[in-house]
Amino acid sequence: MFRRLFGKQPQYHAGDLQVIDNLRKYGADLRKPRDTVHYLYFPTESAAEQAAARVRPLGLVGKVEPSATGSNWCLRANHDLVVNPDSITAERRALEEICASLGGDYDGWEAAV
């Protein structure tokens, strides 16, 4: 998919590849969709709520809550996804763009085995 769009192999994030490798190692069938949760952090509740509205069109359901530490706000955004390097790279790019536009930080993802 990315090769058609960009004419070359996408740059994969090493952490994403490690999570995918761990899922495989623990027996996950990566051909099947699984609950995937992304973590986005913002300096204000308002910015986190705006991000939650922006992830909805991407098919994600967001929950805004105070960060476990510090004064930031966390947006936990999840949906079912067939996890592979291309799908995660696309999600990471979209979510990092949302974070950048609202002064936030994308802190990665996790998925159920």
Image: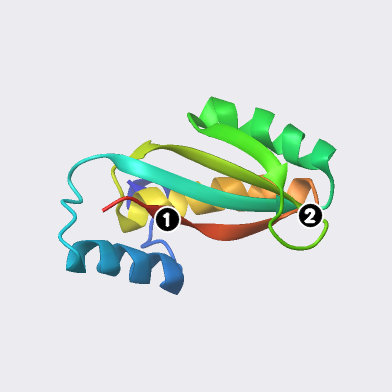
Label 2 CA crowd tier, 10 Å (few <14, some 14–19, many 20+): some
Q: Where does the image place residue 39, in percent across and percent down from the top left?
A: 58, 52
Image marks 1 and 2: residues in contact by CB distance under 8 Å: no
Task: Give the numbered dot on residue 110.
Answer: 1
Above or below 26: residue 77: above
Above or below 45: residue 73: below
Above or below 40: residue 46: above
The residue under label 2 is which amino acid type? Asn
Q: Where does the image place residue 26, in percent across and percent down from the top left?
A: 19, 64
- Say which residue label 2 marks: 72
Above or below 106: residue 21: below
In terms of secondary structure, where does tag 1 sit? strand
**85 displayed left or right of 66:** left
**47 displayed left or right of 11:** right
Between 71 and 6, the residue placed more toward the observer is 71
Q: Where does the image place residue 24, in percent across and percent down from the top left?
A: 20, 63
Residue at 58% in and 44% down: 76
